[in-house]
Amino acid sequence: MSGGVIPVGIADPAVEAAPPERQADRAGALGPWLDRIAPLIGLGGLLALWFVAGLVLESIPAYSAFVGFAPGPALASFADLLSTGEAWRAAAPSLARILQGLGLAFVLGAPLGLLMGSSLRLERILQPPFQLLRMISPLAWMPVAILVFPSWDGAIVFLIAAAAIWPILFSTAAGVKRVDPVWLTLARNLGAGGLVTLRTIVVPAVTQDILTGLRLALGVAWIVLVPAEYLGVTSGLGYAINDARDTLSYDRLAALVLLIGLIGYALDSLLGRLAARARWVPAT
């Protein structure tokens, strides 16, 4: 062929696309790298939206009083919270209340979930009242908590537990109902009693469900925490938020909101990792 012209419809081998195997190799090489940076992409997008919102606040005179919410002042105040130790002083009482509330919810919710999942008749008895109570906002119990408990801390722990018990209870019950009946039959055939079966088969099998329920409970409890700490306490993240609002310290308020989000994200990630590792396979 003269002049090296390639007829129309005939592909030039030099510019042919890479074979599917090579394309798959490239995609496979990029996959783990993209998986690692995917969370950073999402957080970067959130930061970009925050930056744009800050520009809007600065550009509109009516909102000039709220420029403290912009990333610059808020991050500067956040750094100040960390350097002065105020972040820990605000977070420590809240974390103590969260742990107490989640502990109480776990102690009550997990056994009830095991009972409900193990007995169909008991589930039919308890399901309606539990669903009714679950639909009541935990904050609606605030007047009752104030009257019943002698201390503000006790009232807050009760409100957190009232919010956190239901995800643990229903997740545990659902996990029990998914236990393979063959395992239970095998345990009975080997002479295992109810308590032994519960300890060696049921509880290990539903550990992941319990941790998943605990993770969901943490999310609900973390949301309830801040308004619950608007009660008469003088410590905690909710109190700090309320104080920053009253003093119009919007940069500090935004920094505290960021702190709440970061702590909640860290706790959720920890429970998520524990739940992902709690897969149980019975020994054969």
Image (spheres, helix red, strand yellow):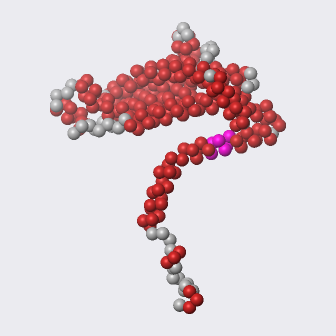
> Quadrant location of residue 8?
bottom right
Question: Whole-percent x and y of residue 202?
Answer: 30, 31
Name of the residue lying farthest toward the bottom: 2
Query: Along the horizontal axis of the image, is 61 left or right of 225?
Result: right
Residue at 16% in and 31% down: 190
Residue at 76% in and 38% down: 57
Name of the residue lying farthest toward the left: 190
Question: Whole-percent x and y of residue 147?
Answer: 56, 10
Question: Whole-percent x and y of residue 26?
Answer: 48, 60
Query: Along the horizontal axis of the image, is 137 left or right of 20?
Result: right
Characterize the magenta stretch by its predominant secondary structure. helix
Tag count: 0
Confirm whether residue 217 shows in the render: yes
Could you tell me which quadrant the C terminus lies in? Answer: top left
Confirm whether residue 170 shows in the render: no
Q: Which residues are magenta?
A: 45-50
Whether 47 is drawn above or below 141: the answer is: below
Query: Along the horizontal axis of the image, is 189 left or right of 135?
Result: left
Residue at 61% in and 29% down: 259
Q: Is residue 172 magenta?
A: no
Query: Along the horizontal axis of the image, is 183 left or right of 116?
Result: left
106 or 237: which is nearer to us? 237
Question: Whole-percent x and y of residue 93?
Answer: 56, 18
Residue at 60% in and 20% down: 89
